[in-house]
Image (spheres, grey):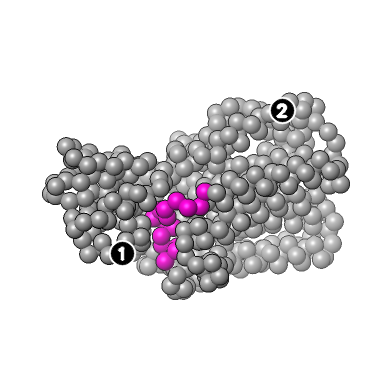
């Protein structure tokens, strides 16, 4: 293997196209399942178009794209999820534009396209693949600009950065890490360049305060999230909590494959010793360090995996470069990608646990029984069957006490002797006559 950046090799082009086609098939054939709670709120906002500051509808650019897509394609579950699926594929295509060796770019793309969390959010009505695509694009633009150091390249990078930090959360962390990388790159230590990075950071802070900071509306909808993150142990309050949360989100990043922890960790240490690429290391390390500091101050729940996705693009880049570096000497090292690529369902199966509830909801909605539903399931129930809300009680119970349907989480609900019990993933529906 060589370090050439030329894409003219036919087999490389064929392999890249095949990779993206495979990723598209995986995503676009899995969009028809029922919306889970968070998706319901997003769908309702896209339909209503009620976009205003300090509400659930951030980041605004994602909602603007969604509104346009709804106008063009309608509000079916599949149509609503098509933009996140597209951005999930774009996320894996962007690495091929980086000024990096072919092998590094290809592996980086594989990691982004077969990441279990990113596949999950490519198939859900959420903004995370959009954020990750912008963050990855910023990394690629930074690599190109720092290599050529032309004004036009930097103008393009900062234009995307400004748009990104005004509309998303992930690019804020990415821009901060790239600013640190610039400080560690001798030829980039110019006052004007560093000042621009600081200016973009201040702009992001202003946008957050003026528009994106959660307000009473979000608290009313989802409750006191600070209290919830305290109960779930997401804040960094001790060394043990730091280790526990780090293990969780990194495990999700590597598709929960212990084999990867050992092999990739060893390759990473060898890469660090051999290359000593401090700017690239800063890209990967700064975002989680910022999140840790914010978590200590109870501002950002470090360890909440869906919010740690902003760390993944640079983390995967440094992992890809470590694997590619080793593979130049021992090509069989590339086989470690196989277990990663075959564990694409683990994020939902072990963490999110969002079953397809269409059959269950249809059954529960029939008749005239009172429905006792946990909020997680009451939201999709009311979304698909709004006529049943008059007889729905949003409550979490541990066992049946009166006649009716009980739609609860299976982990905390005992149906007792209910004659009709339906189970789907972490959901259970029980009917008591």
Query: SS for tag 2?
Result: helix
Up/down of 10 relative to 59, above or below: above
Query: SS for tag 1?
Result: helix
Residue 48: x percent and y percent? 43, 72
Residue corresponding to mark 2? 333
- Is 80 situated left or right of 411 in this image? right
Residue 32: x percent and y percent? 47, 53
Asked if residue 132 shows in the view, the reply is no
Q: Which mark is residue 386?
A: 1
Count every numbered label the image shows and give the total. Answer: 2
N-terminal-most mark, 2 or 1: 2
Boundaries of the magenta span: 30-44
Q: Which mark is residue 97?
A: none
Please state which of residues 104 and 173 is positioned toward the viewer in this rendering: 104
- Is 274 situated left or right of 67 in this image? right
Please state which of residues 426 and 224 is positioned toward the viewer in this rendering: 426
Please state which of residues 332 and 131 is positioned toward the viewer in this rendering: 332
Q: Residue at x 64, y 58 (%)?
A: 134
Q: Residue at x 77, y 36 (%)?
A: 275
Local packing at callout 1 (Cα closer than 10 Å; few below 14, some 14-19, many 20+) is: few
Q: Is residue 34 magenta?
A: yes
Residue 73: x percent and y percent? 54, 67
Q: Residue at x 84, y 47 (%)?
A: 7
Local packing at callout 2 (Cα closer than 10 Å; few below 14, some 14-19, many 20+) is: some
* Quarter of the figure with residue 412: top left
Q: CA distance from mark 2 to mark 1?
A: 54 Å
Asked if residue 153 shows in the view, the reply is yes
């Amino acid at each position: 293997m060589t370090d050439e950046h030329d894409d003219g090799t036919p087999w490389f082009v064929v392999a890249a196209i095949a990779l993206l086609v495979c990723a598209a098939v995986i995503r676009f054939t899995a969009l028809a399942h029922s919306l889970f709670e968070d998706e319901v709120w997003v769908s309702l906002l896209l339909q209503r178009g009620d976009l205003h500051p300090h509400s659930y509808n951030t980041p605004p650019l994602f909602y603007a794209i969604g509104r346009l897509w709804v106008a063009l394609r309608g509000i079916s579950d599949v149509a609503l999820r098509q933009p996140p699926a597209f951005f999930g594929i774009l996320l894996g295509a962007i690495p091929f534009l980086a000024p990096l060796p072919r092998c590094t770019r290809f592996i980086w793309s594989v990691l982004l396209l077969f990441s279990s969390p990113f596949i999950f959010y490519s198939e859900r009505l959420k903004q995370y693949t959009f954020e990750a695509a912008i963050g990855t694009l910023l990394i690629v633009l930074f690599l190109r600009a720092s290599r050529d150091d032309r004004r036009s390249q930097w103008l393009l990078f900062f234009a995307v950065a400004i748009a990104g930090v005004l509309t998303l959360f992930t690019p804020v962390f990415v821009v901060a890490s790239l600013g640190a990388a610039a400080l560690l790159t001798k030829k980039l230590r110019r006052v004007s360049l560093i000042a621009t990075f600081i200016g973009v950071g201040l702009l992001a802070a202003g946008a957050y305060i003026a528009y994106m900071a959660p307000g009473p509306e979000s608290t009313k909808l989802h409750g006191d999230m600070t209290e919830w993150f305290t109960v779930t142990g997401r804040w960094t309050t001790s060394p043990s909590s730091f280790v526990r949360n780090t293990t969780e989100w990194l495990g999700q990043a590597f598709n929960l494959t212990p084999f990867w922890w050992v092999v990739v960790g060893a390759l990473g240490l060898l890469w660090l010793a051999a290359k000593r690429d401090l700017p690239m290391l800063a890209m990967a390390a700064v975002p989680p360090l910022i999140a840790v500091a914010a978590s200590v101050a109870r501002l950002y729940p470090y360890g909440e995996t869906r919010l740690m996705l902003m760390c993944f693009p640079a983390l995967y880049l440094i992992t890809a470069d470590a694997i590619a570096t080793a593979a130049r000497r021992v090509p069989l090292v590339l086989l470690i990608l196989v277990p990663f690529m075959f564990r694409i369902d683990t994020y939902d199966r072990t963490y999110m646990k969002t079953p397809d509830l269409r059959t269950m909801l249809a059954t529960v909605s029939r008749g005239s029984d009172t429905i006792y539903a946990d909020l997680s399931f009451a939201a999709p129930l009311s979304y698909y069957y709004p006529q049943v809300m008059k007889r729905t009680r949003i409550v979490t119970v541990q066992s049946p006490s009166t006649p009716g349907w009980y739609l609860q989480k299976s982990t905390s609900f005992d149906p007792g002797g209910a004659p009709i019990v339906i189970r789907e993933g972490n959901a259970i529906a029980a009917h008591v006559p």
